[in-house]
Image (cartoon, rainbow, N blue to C red):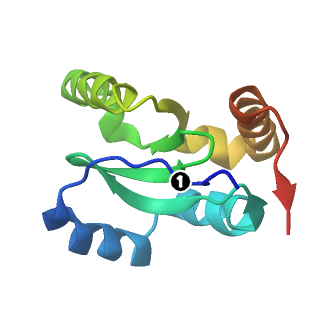
Amino acid sequence: MEKDYHFTGYNKKLCDTARMLRKNMTKQERHLWYDYLRKSSPTWLRQRVIDQYIVDFYCSKAKLIIELDGSQHYTVEGEEYDSVRTEVLEQYGLEVIRFSNDEIDRHFDDSCRYIEEKIKERIGEYPVYR
């Protein structure tokens, strides 16, 4: 049986912060989690510590990360930080896909279809919903 797990290093000091973020998700994170990802197989984790970062959503089997970007991501500093962060995460063989909060608010179904296509591309099958 093939493992549905991909090991990545992580900073244990960030675990409490990740736990707090799971309890205080943004409106868009809650929408994507409760109305889509939570019911999906392969399994998704939310606010997962990988290396020195906390990613919004992580699917180990597909080696896929979803990031939801608020306005702070569209500053020069935010874009530079995200670029470095993405490079580090890609060194683990992970792919990072990004949606703006506005995309989740206005184009939720299209965003979900895009995620489905990425999963199919990465593992050869579409997700199943429980």
Residue at image coords 66%, 51%: 2
Residue at image coords 35%, 69%: 21
Quick one: 30 or 71, which is closer to the camera? Answer: 30
- Residue 64 falls left or right of residue 10: right
Residue at image coords 40%, 74%: 24
- Name above or below for residue 44 compared with residue 89: below
Quick one: 19 or 6, which is closer to the camera? Answer: 6
- Residue 7 falls left or right of residue 28: left
Quick one: 21 or 14, which is closer to the camera? Answer: 14
Quick one: 56 or 88, which is closer to the camera? Answer: 88
Across and down, in percent, residue 130 comes to: 85, 69
Residue at image coords 54%, 39%: 63
Across and down, in percent, residue 32 comes to: 65, 57
**Residue 22 location, quadrant:** bottom left
Quadrant of the frame with the N terminus: bottom right
Q: Furthest residue to the front?
A: 1
> Which residue is denoted by mark 1 in the rendering?
5
For badge 1, the amino acid type reads Tyr
**Residue 76 location, quadrant:** top left
- Residue 42 falls left or right of residue 49: right
Label 1 sits on a secondary structure element that is loop
Across and down, in percent, residue 46 comes to: 49, 62
